[in-house]
Image (cartoon, rainbow, N blue to C red):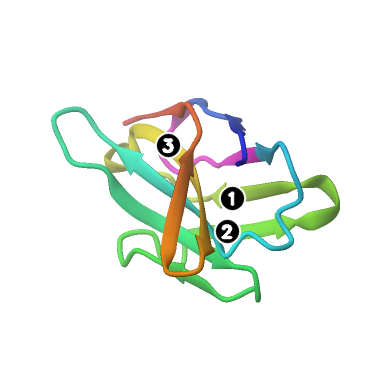
Amino acid sequence: QVQLVESGGGLVQAGGSLRLSCAASRSIFNINTMGWYRQAPEKQRELVATVSSGGITSYADSVKGRFTISSDATKKTVYLQMNSLKPGDTAVYYCKAAMWSGSTRYDYWGQGTQVTVSP
C-alpha cells in the first residue's frame, strides 16, 4: 500500500504558474506508474499526466506544452509543474499511484488539491 498527499494548489490568475507535489508514504522507485488527474465541477475525472517507473511521461492534449510531470525518488515525490494556466484548468487535482501485482493492478489516490484559475 501507499498513502499519497497532494499539496501546492491555490488561486492563480490566468497565465500564471503553480507546482503541485504528491508525497508518497513509501519509495516510488518500484511504483509502476504515477499520475495526476483532475476533476472539474460536474465533470468526470480526467487524466492530466503520467510518469512510469522508467521515466516515460505522457500528457493529455489539453496540457501538452504547458504542464510537466516529474518525479524525485529520493524525496518520494511526484511533481506537476503547471504553466500558462487557463480558467479551464480549474479543478481538484488528484495524484494516483498504480502498482501491479501479477495480473492485478492496485490504484491508490490522494485526497486532492484545489486549483482555481481566475480570468
The kind of residue tagged 3 is Tyr
| Crowd class of label 2 (few under 14; some 14 to 19; many from 20; radius 10 Å) | many
- Which structural element holds mark 1? strand
Of the pair 98 and 54, the residue shown nearer to us: 98
Viewer-side label of 2, 1: 2
The dot on residue 81 is: 1
Whether label 3 touches label 2, CB < 8 Å: no
Q: Which residue is mark 2?
A: 69
At a point 42% along the width and 69% down the height, the residue shown is 103
Percent of width and height locating residue 75: 82, 46
Q: Earlier in the sequence, mark 3 or mark 2?
A: 2
Q: Which residue is mark 3?
A: 93
Of the pair 12 and 51, the residue shown nearer to us: 51
Percent of width and height locating residue 11: 47, 23
The kind of residue tagged 2 is Ile
Percent of width and height locating residue 19: 61, 41
Residue 113 shows in the view: yes
